[in-house]
Image: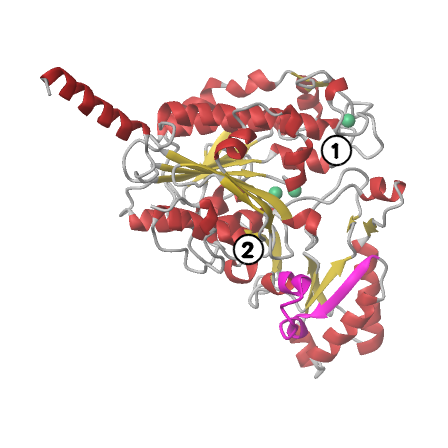
Amino acid sequence: MNTKSFFIIVSLLLLGCNSNHDNDKTKLVVGVVVDQMRMDYLYRFQSHFGENGFKRFYNEGFVAKNHHFDYRQTKTGPGHASIATGTPPAINGIIGNDWFDRQSRKSRYCVDDSTYKSLGTARAKGKAPTALLVSTFADENRLATQMNGKAVSVSLKDRSAILAIGHTANGAYWFSGGDEGNFISSTFYMDALPAWATDFNTSRKIDDYLTTWDTYYPISQYAETGRDDSPYEKRPKGKETPTFPYDLAALAATNNGYDALQATPFGNSLVTDFALAALKGEGLGADDHPDVFMVSYSSTDYIGHDFGTNAKELQDAYIRLDLELARLFRALDTHVGKGAYTVFLTADHGVAPVPNYLTDNKIPAGYFRKKPFVKALEKALQDAFGLNDIILDVSNDEVYLNRELISSAKLDVDVIRRFAVAFIQRQDGIAAAYTTTDLMKMDADNPIVERLQNGYNPKRSGDVIYMLLPGYIAKRTYGTTHGSAFIYDTHVPLLLYGNGIQKGQTFKRTKISDIAPTICALLEISNPTGVTGNPIGEALLSR
Ligand code: ZN
Ligand code: ZN
Ligand code: ZN
């Protein structure tokens, strides 16, 4: 063989190695969490998606089509905690966005911690993941790489950014709205915001979004949702009808400044902008130590709450989110290299259809009024046991009893719990109620019982847990919400793409707590400290 052909063969071999990263470990794991995204949205809006957003997962990745939350508190804080740790609230301790703290006798927010200060803002109190009782897969990757692999997260919401990444993160960043419009952090992670973050804030890129929100494609093409002007949607302050177009500069003036952007697709665009700044600024995926980058899109949640599951506004939000994903993929291809990174996409919970929309279509649904319910329960307990203030708090569909008062009155707390259960079960809108003691003795083969048990944390939960009927939500005048153990709240997508991922799909039931062990298997590192899930083997290439 002459020198020239030898050179060509060697070049081809090297080229082959370069373009095929299948045997190389991933350089970056990107976890995309879409706030309030139900699985059916993927099917429903699919015909409007381009080739480089959601379809990248479909065409080249793995799709888990029967992926579920396995606990009842389907809310943002618990959702992000469960994705990151591979555990339900029973183990990770995040039993709600807020919960009643027996020691201080006050409600606490899941990421508040006054021992730290917020950075880049004059508005927010200190935040930290202190209430999260276990490690995350990003934490395990930090440990496995001797802290050389980075861990960074971005979201509009503090709880999403903080709980998705964990205790050892280099940085978690979230949005301060109002008159600030900055991405901020906490002294828990760092002494001061990095230059790339302050540069982003001072650029006032955000002001580009105080523009007009109209549908991306002509609204006549949005056949998969109901009419724009529907009685189920919120009328934003300063606007007569819930209809396109929305003048965002005008809405910002009447709706607490930059907060107005959160319930528009531009909140998600802003997250992509900041995420790309973080990708470059932190040099994520730049070296051979794998990094973890969590990007959480929350505008879909604000829009879903305001307009419901059948709104043109929601459809436009997902059509535009597909373009944001394409933008994220493009940046990862450029900065990390196609085949060198891995992306997964999931949601922190689903959402219920608007109850009024269901009942208008003869489907059972309704609204639960908590205030009169609590009042009636208080009165019934008072009449039966002769004590005032037996109830300390009712939150997250749990009743906290004043155990000290009950025992000092020489009453049996179990008798009072059972009395409360019998009373609650008779009320309108209630499906079932259990004392937490009885709940833990029940058969976990019943899937609803299992979801209630997985939500019960002995140190933080209450004395009695109740469930609303399917299709019922807490009373509100427009839009909808989430937080139940039913399928509209539990069924979310899990999509995987890139380095180490096997192309395919499954209808096998997979759980949200399977995500963290799957990523740990991909990275070949130890699991978070509380993991209850299992790796989804079909999704991973054999190496
Ligand atoms: Zn959420
Ligand atoms: Zn509308
Ligand atoms: Zn929500």
Q: Is residue 508 positioned above or below 435 on the image?
A: above
| Picture coordinates of residue 529, whole percent (x, y) | 41, 59
Task: Name the residue carrying label 2.
Answer: 94
Q: Residue 14 versus residue 253: which sits nearer the camera?
A: 14
Q: Tag count in the figure?
A: 2
Picture quadrant where residue 6 is located: top left
Amino acid at circle 2: Ile
Q: Residue at x 56, y 31 (%)?
A: 54
Q: How crowded is mark 2: few (under 14 residues within 10 Å), some or many (20 or more)?
A: many
Q: Which comes sooner in the sequence, label 2 or label 1?
A: 2
Q: Residue at x 70, y 84 (%)?
A: 410
Q: Residue 347 versus residue 434: which sits nearer the camera?
A: 347
Range covered by the magenta-colored residues: 429-451
Amino acid at circle 1: Phe
Q: What element carries label 2?
A: loop
Q: Which of marks 2 and 1 is in front?
A: 1
In the image: residue 182, left or right of residue 248 = left
| Picture coordinates of residue 522, whole percent (x, y) | 38, 46
Task: Name the residue carrying label 1.
Answer: 307
Q: Which residue lies furthest to the left in this view?
A: 2
Q: Residues within 10 Å of mark 1 (few under 14, many from 20)?
A: many
Residue 434 included in the magenta stretch of the image: yes
Residue 241 included in the magenta stretch of the image: no
